[in-house]
Image: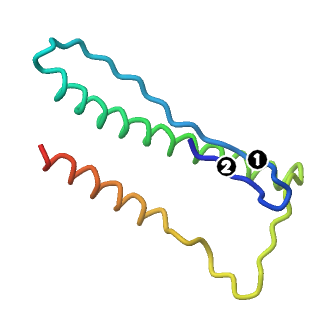
Amino acid sequence: DTAVFDVKSRTMLFRAPGINKLSKRTTAIGIDSTLEQKSREGFGLAVADMTTNLDAELSRFKTRVKEENVAKVEYRAGYSGGAINGYFLLLAFGLLLSRLKFRR
């Protein structure tokens, strides 16, 4: 899950869940490798689902800010944007997945 809070008011502004459920039957002999593989695959799919949900929730939140005034957006002097770029996160996630694949 990703949740965005307003710290000052202690209010949750929006959340974006990431869910995936994989199933595969296996014999007891190959259970460890099957569970590990399905765990990695399920995690990747859940993160992809969460990313899609986060994009949709952020779009809805932007609309609510404009139309319903649910939040006040202010930029402080010296503000330069977010701490982490979205492309950097995608690159880091891709590197993580490729590293997991090569560990096999």
Amino acid type at mark 2: Ser
Residue at 76% x, 49% y is 13
**How many C-alpha atoms fall within 10 Å of the one at disc 1: few (<14), some, or many (≥20)?**
few
Q: Observer-nearest residue: 42 or 52?
A: 42
Q: Quadrant of residue 48?
A: top left
Reading the image, the residue beneath label 1 is 12
From the viewer's perspective, is 7 left or right of 35? Answer: right
Q: Residues within 10 Å of mark 2 (few under 14, many from 20)?
A: few
Secondary structure state at the residue bearing disc 1: strand
Determine the residue positioned at 77% across, 77% down: 75
Q: Which quadrant would residue 28 be assigned to in this image?
A: top left
Q: Is residue 29 above or below residue 45?
A: above
Residue 5 image point, x, y percent: 73, 53
Residue that label 2 marks: 59
In the displayed structure, does residue 23 sit left or right of residue 76? left
Q: Decide: is 33 above or below 30.
A: below
In this orientation, which residue lies closer to the viewer: 34 or 71? 34
Q: Is residue 65 toward the left or the right of residue 50 in the image?
A: right
Q: Which mark is residue 53?
A: none
* Residue for point 64% across, 47% down: 3
